């Protein structure tokens, strides 16, 4: 019996020894795994920081310049005939989608507030003398609608006006959604808010002329057509500037006689197509041939290429085939990538002529925080936001949005330049 007890004690000691060894082995393995994991995390963080530093440097080097006058015909510093500079900015289609209506609705007061959508952008428009846009919605006494027949709360127009936009085209495929009465109500309300308008044929003239720093600048606007056009009467269609060579040539002749520089806003092209169609190019050729100095396109809901051409007099003509949207709730990835186009004109103190001096742009992005967010939609500065994230401000946007901003900036460079 004693021998058996000794054997049991020996077995217990062996078991204890083996358990201790196993414990130490397992502990060693566990610590090794933890060390590897921590090392991997630290290494990945190091690589992320290195990548962000590199991206931050690349963002600093990105220049959103499209054109700059190479021969500066600036008057001599001793001369009293100084050149004057006129600054204009332009944005694309201004839409108010159904989701934006839901986002803006204030349940407590039964009113709408769109201010939060634009609050980050106003500073980019302050220096401009005129800010152009295309109002692709109506302001009528009908019920609100973000799709199909477009009609928005008047608070939306006020929010756009508060950003600085002060001249809008009302010539789009949705301009006659509510007939001539709707077009007139929309024009009247926009003008009440202080917008200059162009694109209709309700008045005596279809050309809008603005005088800036003693310089007369003409604005013309046309649409390729309207929704459900076959159902519209001839009288209805004649109240809107639907493009034709005859109409455009007549308007351009008037503009050349009464202004020193001519902008044409075109509602044309195919939805979500990032390259101009043959028809767009042919229309651009005709407009340049007949005196247009700047052509600004919209309607495709995405950015299209821009180019500098020379007219028959050897003067530079700028074409932006599509500026995309200024704001919308379209969930197409490329439709969230927008820009504010900046155009600088120089009026010579020597010969009094107006020259295209400089063109650049500010990339902007429609940030969607999700349908459950209190303020769902927000326009943000793409480059500034991306730089802030790359510099360590991880709260400004999430990593997914940051990557979307980088991809968007790369896309803009490819398309625009």
Image (cartoon, grey):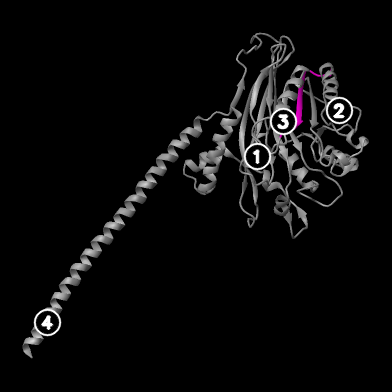
Disc 1: which residue = 121
Q: How far apart are marks 1 and 2 (CA)?
A: 31 Å
The quadrant of the image that shows the C terminus is top right
Among the two numbered marks 2 and 4 on one chain, the one whose residue lies closer to the N terminus: 4
The answer to whether residue 213 shows anywhere in this view is no
- Which residues make up the magenta segment? 258-269
Vertical side of 179 occupied by 8: above or below = below
- Which picture quadrant has residue 200? top right
Residue under pointer 4: 9
Q: Residue 64's x, y, as percent?
A: 58, 29
The answer to which of marks 4 and 3 sits earlier in the sequence is 4
Q: What element carries label 3?
A: strand
Q: Which quarter of the rendered picture does the N terminus lie within?
A: bottom left
> How many residues crowd around disc 2 within 10 Å: few (fewer than 14), some, or many (20 or more)?
many
What is the CA distance from the residue labelled 2 to the residue labelled 4? 109 Å
Residue at horizontal 20 percent and vertical 72 percent from the top: 19
Where in the figure is residue 277, as x and y percent of width and height?
69, 30
Compared to residue 302, the image places residue 253 above or below, namely above
Q: Earlier in the sequence, mark 3 or mark 1?
A: 1
Tell us which disc is closer to us: 3 or 1.
3
Q: Viewer-nearest of labels 1 and 2?
A: 2
Whether tag 1 and tag 4 are in contact, CB under 8 A, the answer is: no
Contact, CB < 8 Å: mark 3 with mark 2?
A: no
Task: Give the mark, 1 or 4, whose residue is nearer the N terminus.
Answer: 4
The structure residue drawn at horizontal position 62% and vertical position 13%, both measured from the top left corner, is: 72
Q: In this view, does 56 lie to the left or right of 330?
A: left
**Disc 3 to disc 2, how far (Cα)?**
18 Å
Would you name the residue on which mark 3 appears? 297
User: Number of marks in the image?
Assistant: 4
Q: Mark 2 points at which residue?
A: 206
């Amino acid at each position: 019996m004693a021998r058996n007890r000794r054997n049991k004690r020996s077995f217990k000691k062996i078991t204890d020894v083996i358990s201790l060894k196993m414990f130490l082995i397992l502990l060693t393995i566990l610590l090794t795994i933890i060390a590897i994991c921590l090392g991997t995390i630290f290494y990945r963080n190091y690589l992320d920081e290195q990548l962000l530093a590199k991206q931050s440097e690349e963002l600093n080097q990105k220049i959103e310049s499209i054109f700059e006058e190479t021969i500066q015909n600036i008057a001599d510093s001793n001369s009293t005939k100084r050149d004057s500079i006129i600054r204009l900015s332009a944005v694309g289609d201004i839409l108010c989608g159904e989701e934006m209506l839901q986002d803006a609705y204030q349940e407590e007061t039964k009113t709408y507030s769109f201010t939060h959508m634009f609050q980050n952008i106003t500073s980019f428009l302050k220096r401009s003398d005129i800010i152009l846009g295309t109002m692709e919605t109506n302001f009528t006494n009908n019920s609100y609608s973000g799709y199909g027949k477009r009609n928005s709360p008047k608070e939306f127009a006020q929010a756009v006006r508060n950003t600085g936009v002060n001249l809008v085209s009302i010539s789009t495929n949705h301009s006659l959604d509510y007939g001539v009465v709707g077009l007139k109500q929309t024009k009247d309300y926009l003008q009440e808010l202080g917008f200059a308008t162009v694109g209709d044929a309700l008045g005596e003239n279809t050309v809008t002329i603005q005088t800036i720093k003693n310089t007369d600048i003409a604005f013309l606007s046309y649409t390729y057509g309207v929704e459900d056009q076959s159902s519209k009467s001839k009288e209805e269609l004649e109240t809107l500037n639907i493009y034709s060579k005859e109409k455009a040539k007549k308007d351009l002749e008037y503009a050349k006689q009464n202004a020193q520089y001519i902008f044409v806003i075109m509602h044309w092209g195919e939805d979500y197509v990032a390259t101009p169609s043959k028809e767009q190019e042919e229309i651009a050729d005709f407009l340049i041939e007949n005196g247009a100095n700047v052509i600004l396109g919209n309607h495709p809901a995405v950015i299209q290429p821009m180019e500098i051409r020379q007219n028959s007099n050897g003067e530079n003509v700028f074409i932006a085939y599509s500026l995309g949207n200024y704001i919308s709730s379209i969930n197409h990835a490329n439709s969230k990538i927008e820009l504010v186009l900046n155009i600088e004109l120089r009026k010579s103190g020597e010969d009094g002529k107006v020259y295209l001096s400089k063109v650049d742009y500010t990339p902007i992005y429609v940030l969607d925080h999700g349908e459950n967010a209190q303020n769902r939609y927000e326009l943000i500065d793409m480059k500034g936001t991306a730089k802030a994230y790359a510099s360590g401000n991880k709260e400004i946007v999430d990593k997914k949005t940051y990557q979307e901003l980088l991809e968007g900036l790369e896309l803009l460079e490819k398309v625009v330049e």
